[in-house]
Image: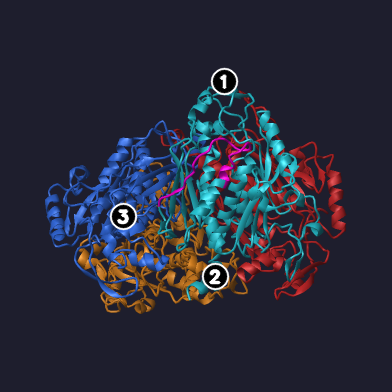
Chain colours: A orange, B blue, C cyan, D red
């Protein structure tokens, strides 16, 4: 349940303000020289910049690799790793430790389990996504061996949407914006809501390039089915593939991607047919809700079912889509790596290449 | 891979024009009197009406239960069942047996496996969804014991969207429309495209009522994560929960659902927080692409990578969202039933109720 | 739960006297020409001879393949198949339908589920093993492509043990005996107990030859761990690998297999080290209890917890080890095929052979 | 693959001489006060006494719980924990870092993965079993709530077998012997082989008492099937349930357990029928091979396939069965806890007790 993937499996643990969070990446092939710089870089990207548009909680987020790697090469054994929780200010939560924060999982965890760690969202905190990004970094090292590239960026903040999509801009932008001409407006949008003690939603765009044809398994682990599970990522309330929502307004003639010897003439399908990659770019949109932690007083109840007003303190992103885009990218990387491994045994022909 | 669910698991097999399709429903609790009438009714709903808005391929779709049921009560053992494929007109596919149909999985299956059953889409056909609906009917029998109700209907056809949502209207409508005042326009929209030898997309709305608080498991099998996997259902290109796409345009203040002693004041969350049901209605939108099988000639290639024109024959739905809505409803039922079983062992307290 | 294997997964359903039993074999690679003769031959072997040493219940055991195969080649999609239950004489069970048969699962199924199909053991019947053998036959077709051979035979009946092991004799022997000189004594042993209305235990020996080095996965799906799960096969009460029970009486010096450039000097390990195949023959022993269905009256209770005498009728094997050996062989075949598929993605080097 | 269990899942990582080993226990119910003393006690038992009969490698084996526990109560979230590897003397392995030790997994890991951590057996080391024991301690805390008790001890060392079985003696004995009158002979046996620079095999007996009726799931996750997987535990070469090996020599009349209103008259079945617990004691025997690390020179080859003599140094148990018994007990505890959770949703009746 706290495990993601089938052949390449990431299991995670950890609460936001516990001693550490961590994970086990199982099924990773042996013999890859790991790239600690890439790992660090991905962790830094997930943190967001140390700027106005991001939370002020800054962990070191040092990934301590405890197993599965020997002389910097993967052993084929599970890669265990932890990240210590250093910068935890649990006292920020003292005043609301018995109050359910609107938009948060406090109330559902309490109702389900009869107990929850109120500090920073506990297990439900986006803090856990650091483990997904660490796992995703390993997945990227693997994908890179096969020239597969996964990228992400911010498509829109509230109603402010990018027009000219440039994934390189996302790497430079403080808010990971995909359009350098729109970026400034998007920043203004964020600050406007932040200054109102409020927050704002946004949309992340994910792209995978040079994906081999044939990735995607049986009907309940199709590529699109696996991608759909990203709907479980904190704050994501809608997932689209290819023409997505728009496809429901189109005709077959408009939406079908015709084919010639060079491939597909269009890419409404977003890189897959029947849940199997078709060699085109994989295109995903993730719609993030606004950060539920806002500094405006809100009606709520406490553990004793008494009505009260919830006043949130602490350090929160004004727009979770920004950092969320990197986590989504990591999850897509994990999915593609998993599919790559699974596909290795899809045909007698591929097996014969191995067991020659 | 061809298995759906964790504790309640539906495994399926079958190609569109093979001898039969079938499934195994494993983990279903013992001691439930099964309701064959409900099963039949669900199968009939999935077929769509014998009307202008639906395919003319009409199977009997008789579910033959082969195991797991004794004297009409469930045994706790796997429920095996098959549905014969009677009404298969494979000759409709003779002219395109070497040609990849745009918008279909022919090309990806061929590239992945080096072989595929070209007749009616083979494994990739929506024919398999009959097994999901049969499995969903069993799930509904279980959910009903706990007063949980799952419903569905058509929200929009192309750009024609319902306004006054009435799930009872969907039960009566030929196109499962949720709004009896809009239904006529939606029908016209379908026929317009059908008469153009084309097809049209649509959106299905799913609702689950009276869902107990607490359904949803660890971070990779949260309720929303599982629901997201419906993105793997044939033709679905986007999945939304609650305020979904709209939430990315809203502020935290607008989107958070405040709480009082009666529950939540609004339901932007769509019935879950942190991937765990919160007692409100679960609200899902599925965006279906238009039927890829259209009768307009399309550019394509054949197995020898030669360019050609694809002329599709046969019997096809002008709008797959209609019948797809019932399949989505079945999948949501399966998910909720699975979550209900899993949640039974979530706390020491609940275990003590059983092992008293 | 009713699924066996990880990458190659056999899910089964069916009660002994229901309409049919069946299975889904998922994950089987595409592109293999199937061998229906081999399939039939394995089914026949499982039935045992139509002789004195075997049950008189003789099903046709025709495996109806419903999917996953097209023009006799595997599609890579799930292989669904059923076997009808024709020769069911449920009336043999009428007199004991409320009485728990000693040595049988009637009582535990009833206590667990509150209901059970009393006819022929229902789900707990060895009848289900026909599906394992059908699945095993597919596994054998796959293993054969890589020159891997799996064999079995009877090592001992009661205290009568074979000395000169010859797997070819098992193919000719009415009781699958591994030693043509001991066979006669073993037959006498069986008939002695049969004539006493009793039954007798036995031991099956399994061997896999030419197994590639490297099969076996992480610590909880090691080759020996998977083989150990055969302890769940009906009637098996002990499983040994290599020197097995004897190894607990030996010293390290005696038990270690020294190594030279030709391989191992001995094979106490039974073909694996650390749960990974080492290139030597895999050697397994399965200890079967005597058939619990005997025609001697036995003390028991009924569903109302009233003491009674249980008189068993019907057609039963005097020694289940005989037919059980074939099922064990099938399970070992399924395990090895699964491990072969999983191992395909164990190293970067093997992946590069595929995605070149 | 490195995960054990279905509903209660223990995933582990770690090499013998890496920085740490660790695990994630997922699916543990919320609301249990954890017993750190019991945890510590189990870890100490696994270490064996600081005596002549056990390895001199003595780790602190402090289990650092990193998540899943709040104010000493379980949260229902994954319990992550690590154990640091402190007392690693990797230099003991310098002389054999390119030589495959007979009876060890060096050679198979190298052949499978093309790389391995030669220090202390790496992933294949019994060091990982510390994580199983930690997980088992949590399982025991859970089982205790339902009065289920799991025990173990040494039944035989080489040919020296206990007669009067007393599990309390095992708790006091330096070698966990089950018979205080035989213990001395068993110790002498160990020392004899130790003084010869050799090692000796042994048999552990496991017992579970007060197990509720009804534990055990579908045909491939029956109680006996799950127990069989303990065959994958380091050094175990045979697993028996109940009368085990002996049952293959008995008649049905001798082996069947007759029933009266007090339960079963005998317990040849070892506590289960059809893979479901029957309310009697669960009785398991684990046959351990002798420690493969012996100080007698042995023939072997190195990574370059050159013949050589292997001289082993370091600190090794003269008989791994002793400490192995505790690990087997832990695994049985994990299995029973898993089965307890799974069984909670077996019937409509039990579900109704929860969702009343």
Q: Which residue is mark 1?
A: C306
Q: Residues within 10 Å of mark 2 (few under 14, many from 20)?
A: some
Pick the front one: A314 or C165: C165
Foreground disc of the pair 2, 1: 2
Mark 1 falls within which chain? C
Q: Quadrant of residue D122?
A: bottom right
**Camera-side residue: A34 or D297?**
D297
Q: Which mark is residue A177?
A: none
Q: Mark 2 and mark 3 in contact (Cβ < 8 Å)?
A: no
How far is the residue under mark 2 from the one under mark 1?
Answer: 62 Å
Mark 2 on the same chain as mark 1: no
Q: Identify the residue under disc 2.
A: A354
Q: Is residue A52 above or below residue B16?
A: below
Residue ID at (70%, 74%): D303
Tag 3 and tag 1 share a subunit:
no
Left or right, residue D242 beside residue B269: right
- Say what secondary structure mark 1 lies in: loop
Q: Is residue C69 magenta?
A: no
Q: Position of residue D351 (x, y in %)?
A: 44, 36
Circle 3 chain: B
Region in magenta: C45-66
Q: CA distance from mark 3 to mark 2?
A: 35 Å
D73 left or right of A286? right
- Disc nearest the viewer among 3 and 1: 3
Q: Which residue is mark 3?
A: B126
| Callout 3 and callout 2 share a chain | no
Rate crowding at label 3 as few (under 14), some (14 to 19) or many (20 or more) other CA atoms within 10 Å.
many
The percent position of residue D270, horizontal first and vertical second, equals: 66, 37
Question: Is any atom of residue C5 visible in this view?
Answer: no
């Amino acid at each position: 349940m706290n495990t993601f993937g089938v052949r390449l499996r990431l299991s995670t643990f950890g609460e936001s303000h516990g001693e550490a969070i961590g994970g086990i990446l199982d099924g990773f092939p042996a013999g890859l020289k790991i790239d600690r710089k890439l790992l660090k870089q991905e962790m830094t990207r997930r943190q967001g910049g140390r700027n106005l548009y991001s939370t002020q909680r800054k962990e070191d987020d040092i990934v301590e690799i405890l197993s599965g790697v020997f002389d910097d090469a993967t052993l084929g054994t599970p890669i265990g790793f932890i990240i210590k929780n250093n910068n935890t200010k649990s006292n920020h939560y003292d005043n609301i430790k018995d109050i359910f924060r609107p938009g948060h999982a406090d109330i559902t965890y309490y109702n389900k389990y009869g107990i929850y760690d109120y500090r920073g969202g506990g297990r439900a905190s986006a803090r856990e996504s650091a483990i997904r990004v660490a796992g995703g970094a390993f997945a990227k090292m693997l994908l890179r061996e096969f020239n597969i590239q996964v990228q992400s960026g911010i498509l829109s903040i509230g109603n402010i949407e990018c027009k000219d999509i440039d994934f390189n801009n996302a790497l430079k932008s403080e808010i990971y914006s995909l359009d350098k001409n729109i970026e400034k407006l998007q920043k203004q949008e964020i600050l406007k809501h932040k200054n109102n003690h409020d927050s704002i939603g946004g949309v992340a765009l994910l792209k995978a390039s040079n994906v081999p044809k044939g990735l995607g398994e049986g009907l309940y682990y199709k590529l699109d089915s696996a991608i759909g599970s990203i709907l479980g990522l904190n704050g994501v309330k809608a997932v689209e593939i290819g023409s997505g929502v728009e496809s429901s307004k189109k005709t077959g003639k408009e939406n079908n991607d015709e084919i010639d010897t060079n491939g597909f003439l269009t890419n409404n399908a977003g890189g897959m047919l029947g849940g199997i990659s078709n060699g085109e770019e994989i295109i995903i949109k993730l719609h993030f809700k606004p950060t539920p932690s806002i500094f405006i007083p809100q009606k709520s109840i406490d553990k004793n079912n008494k009505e009260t007003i919830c006043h949130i303190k602490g350090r929160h992103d004004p727009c979770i889509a920004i950092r969320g885009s990197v986590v989504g990218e990591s999850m897509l990387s994990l999915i593609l790596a998993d599919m790559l491994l699974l596909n290795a045994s899809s045909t007698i022909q591929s097996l014969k290449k191995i067991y020659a």
